[in-house]
Image: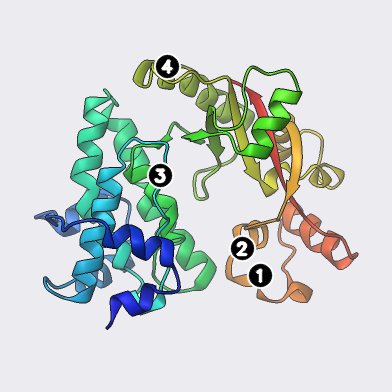
C-alpha cells in the first residue's frame, strides 16, 4: 500500500502529516481489558486485536503521524486536519491510533484535575461510536473517525446525558450572537453541546443535571477560558418537529432551551433515528411517534433541517 498516494486526495492532511516526525507507538499490555474499559462492543474485540498495525508497515507510518498530530495539539482549540475514513486502511485502523494516544490523553486529564469517572465516561465514547457504526452500517468499524479526535485531544467531556466540547464560535454564529447583543464574536471560546446515541432518554431532568455539571466543570478545570454561551448544531433543533410531537415530549423540551439561529443540512437525522433502515425513504419504518413524524413529513414532500441554537453559559 502506498500511503502517500492514498492521501494525495487530501493535500492539507498529507502536508500536515509529512511535517511531523515519528512517534513512539505503545499499546496497552492487556488489550482485551482496555478495549472493554472503552466500551468496545464484545463482537468487535477480536477483530480489533487482529487489525493491529505491524511496525515498519505503511499503516504504522500513518499511525505514528496521526498519533503525533493528536498529542502535539493536546488541549489546543486550534484544530489539526481531520482524520479521513479511508476504506483501504480497514475498519479498525483509527482505534489503534486512539489506543496509542490514550495514555497522553489521560495524563492531560490528570494535569487538569479531571475526575477519573469523567475521563472514563468520556473515553467510553470510542466504544459507543463503534456501536453506532454497526447500527448504521451493519458491520464493525468506527463511526466518523474524526469525531474522537475531540476526546483524545482533551476538548470534549461526557457530563451525564450530554457531552460538552471546548470550541470557538464560527464566523456566522459569532456574528449573529454579537448582533444579538452578547459579549462574544467570531473565534471566541464557547461550549458545543452534543447529544450522544445509546445514552438513555433525553429527559429534562437528565439534561438539567448535565448543564449544571458543565457550568461547574469548565470554570474549575479550564479557568483561563471565559465561556459566555453554549451552542448546539443538530437535527433535534429543527422546530418543525414540534408540529408532530406532544408539547411535553423530551425533544420539544430540549429545543425550548435554545435560541435558534440558522438552518443547516439535516446531517445524520435519518441514520441517527433509523440506522440501517434509512436506505429507502419510501419504506421508512413507523414504529415510534418520532419515526412516524419524520417519515410522514418526508412522504408529504417536506424537508428536515438541522438548526444551530445557543443558550447562555
The image shows residue 73 at horizontal and vertical percentages of 31, 42
Going 61% across and 33% down the picture, which residue do you hit? 231
Sequence order check, earlier mark of 3 and 4: 3
| Residue, disc 4 | 219
Give me the C-alpha separation between circle 1 and circle 3.
27 Å
Nearest the eye: 19 or 199: 19
The 10 Å Cα crowd at callout 1, few under 14, some 14 to 19, many 20 or more, is some
Residue behind mark 2: 271
Q: Label 1 near label 2: C-beta < 8 Å?
A: yes
Q: Which mark is residue 150?
A: 3
User: Taking the image as drawn, is residue 214 in sight?
Assistant: yes
Disc 4 secondary structure class? helix
Neighbour tally class for label 4: few under 14, some 14-19, many 20 plus, Cα within 10 Å: few
> In the rendered view, does 45 fall on the left or right side of 306?
left
Residue at the spot 23% in from the left edge and 52% down from the top edge? 68
Estimate the spatial distance between the alpha carbons at disc 3 and disc 4, rounded to whole Å: 19 Å
> Which tag, 2 or 3, sits closer to the chain's start?
3
Q: Quadrant of the N terminus?
A: bottom left
The residue sitting at the right extreme is 300
Q: Distance between the residues labelled 2 and 3?
A: 22 Å
Residue placed furthest toward the bottom = 1
> Viewed as shown, does residue 256 lie left or right of 278?
right
Residue 224 screen position, x and y as percent: 39, 18
Q: Nearer the viewer, mark 1 or mark 3?
A: 3
Asked which quadrant contains residue 159, the reply is top left
Q: Distance between the residues labelled 2 and 1?
A: 6 Å
Asked whether the viewer can see residue 36, the reply is no
* Residue picked out by circle 1: 278
> Marks 4/1: CA distance?
41 Å
Comes first in the chain, label 2 or label 4: 4
Amino acid at each position: 500500500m502506498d500511503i502517500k498516494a492514498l492521501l494525495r486526495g487530501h493535500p492539507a492532511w498529507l502536508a500536515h502529516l509529512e511535517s511531523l516526525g515519528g512517534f513512539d507507538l505503545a499499546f496497552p499490555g492487556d488489550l482485551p481489558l482496555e478495549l472493554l474499559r472503552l466500551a468496545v462492543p464484545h463482537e468487535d474485540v477480536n477483530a480489533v486485536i487482529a487489525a493491529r498495525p505491524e511496525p515498519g508497515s505503511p499503516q504504522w507510518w500513518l499511525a505514528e503521524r496521526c498519533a503525533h498530530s493528536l498529542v502535539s495539539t493536546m488541549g489546543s482549540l486550534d484544530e489539526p486536519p481531520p482524520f479521513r475514513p479511508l476504506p483501504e486502511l480497514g475498519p479498525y485502523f483509527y482505534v489503534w491510533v486512539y489506543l496509542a494516544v490514550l495514555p497522553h490523553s489521560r495524563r492531560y486529564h490528570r494535569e487538569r484535575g479531571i475526575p477519573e469517572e469523567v475521563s472514563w465516561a468520556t473515553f467510553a465514547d470510542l466504544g459507543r461510536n463503534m456501536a453506532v457504526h454497526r447500527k448504521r452500517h451493519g458491520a464493525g468499524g468506527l463511526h466518523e473517525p474524526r469525531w474522537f479526535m475531540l476526546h483524545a485531544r482533551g476538548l470534549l467531556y461526557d457530563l451525564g446525558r450530554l457531552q460538552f466540547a471546548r470550541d470557538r464560535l464560527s464566523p456566522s454564529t459569532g456574528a449573529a450572537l454579537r448582533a444579538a447583543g452578547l459579549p462574544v464574536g467570531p473565534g471566541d471560546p464557547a461550549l458545543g453541546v452534543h447529544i450522544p446515541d445509546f445514552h438513555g432518554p433525553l429527559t429534562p431532568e437528565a439534561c438539567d443535571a448535565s448543564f449544571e455539571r458543565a457550568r461547574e466543570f469548565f470554570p474549575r478545570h479550564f479557568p483561563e477560558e471565559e465561556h459566555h454561551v453554549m451552542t448546539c448544531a443538530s437535527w433535534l433543533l429543527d422546530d418543525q418537529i414540534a408540529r408532530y410531537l406532544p408539547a411535553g415530549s423530551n425533544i420539544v423540551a430540549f429545543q425550548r432551551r435554545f435560541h435558534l439561529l440558522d438552518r443547516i443540512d439535516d446531517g445524520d437525522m435519518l441514520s441517527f433515528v433509523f440506522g440501517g433502515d434509512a436506505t429507502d425513504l419510501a419504506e421508512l419504518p413507523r414504529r415510534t411517534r418520532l419515526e412516524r413524524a419524520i417519515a410522514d413529513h418526508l412522504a408529504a414532500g417536506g424537508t428536515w433541517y438541522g438548526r444551530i441554537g445557543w443558550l447562555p453559559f
